[in-house]
Image (cartoon, rainbow, N blue to C red):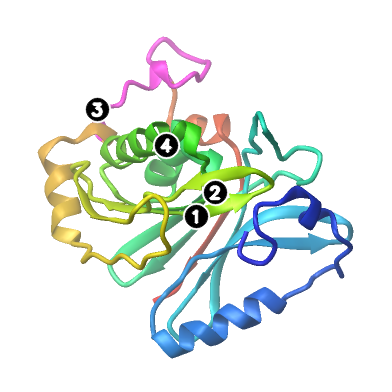
Amino acid sequence: MVDTGYSMPSIQEPRRPGTKAPYRSYKKRRKNFRSRFSPAFLIVTVRVFTNSQALIDANGNIIAKYRKTHLVTAAPLDERPYFTAGDGFASCKIDKFNLGLGICYDLRFPEFYRTLAVNHGTNVLVNSSAWPFPRVEHLRILAMARAIENQSYLVLANRVGTDDEVTFCGTSAIIDPYGAIVAAASVDREELIQAELSEEVVNSVRSGMAVFAHRRRIFTGCRGSRAGCTSKDFATRYALPQREKNCT
């Protein structure tokens, strides 16, 4: 939450619906760096608060938006009294890659990222997060697992510092489809990390072990014939609307 901090009292402060000041500020910064960026913001629309993420391109344009679908409830954190859950996926094609967006707690739901990979064709998963120290190992292991099982890059941006006596664990990372960490940040400092993404690596991993083709749909939780269910049934099972743009 770059505009409020991950602080529920700050989030509750009165705000004008549709406020876009944080977007304008970060759009200007992206023009200076000539890079793409995906921060998380608070968005207010007619008294509805959402934990949201925006993908901003090198020209400062917002090319994709995502509203967090899984609201965390794990002491001392509880988002449910403050936020409204989103109801859709967001993905965006950039050059040879298709980025799928997610926020923090979404990382604990493998079906969320599997749907992005299978039904939305993503090969780079992006997660911006405020993950606390007591579960730092969970963050590392879950991020690696999501990259491996979806044969995709995973770009994790986790905050550092303390809000409301909760300290966050950093360890931002870029993980390749093999599950190898190709770039990593420390647990307690603001740092910029970078890595080169390779379409050849994605293709090599996916052709070497075709896990998407080998999925037994009878185990996806779909109801129907003994043979399992179709990809359409799978999409219906985890039916959130698709919000995808071609942003090349």
The structure residue drawn at horizontal position 76% and vertical position 46%, both measured from the top left corner, is: 83
Residue interval drawn in magenta: 213-228
Q: Which badge, 2 or 3, is on the more N-terminal residue? A: 2
Q: Dot 2: within a 10 Å radius of its alpha carbon, few (fewer than 14), some, or many (20 or more) residues?
A: many
Q: Position of residue 89 (x, y in %)?
A: 56, 50
The structure residue drawn at horizontal position 65% and vertical position 52%, both measured from the top left corner, is: 6
Amino acid carrying label 4: it is: Val
Q: Position of residue 72 (x, y in %)?
A: 64, 35
- Residue under pointer 4: 136
Q: Cβ–Cβ below 8 Å for labels 2 and 4?
A: no
- Residue under pointer 2: 130
Q: Which badge, 4 or 3, is on the more N-terminal residue? A: 4
Alpha-carbon span between mark 2 and mark 3: 35 Å
Q: Position of residue 148 (x, y in %)?
A: 26, 38
Q: Which badge, 1 or 2, is on the more N-terminal residue? A: 2
- Reply above or below: 22 against 10: below
- Toward which corner of the image does residue 52 lie, by quadrant? bottom right
Q: Nearer the viewer, residue 226 or 135?
A: 135
- Residue under pointer 1: 159
Residue 180 drawn in magenta: no
Q: Main secondary structure of the magenta part?
A: loop
Amino acid carrying label 3: it is: His
Alpha-carbon span between mark 2 and mark 4: 11 Å
Q: Which badge, 2 or 4, is on the more N-terminal residue? A: 2
Alpha-carbon span between mark 1 and mark 2: 5 Å
Mark 2 or 3: in front is 2
Q: Cβ–Cβ below 8 Å for labels 1 and 2?
A: yes
Mark 4 or 3: in front is 4
Amino acid carrying label 2: it is: Ala
Screen quadrant of the N terminus: bottom right
Check residue 214 in the rendering and tell me which mark sits there, or answer none: 3
Judged left or right of residue 35, residue 67 is right
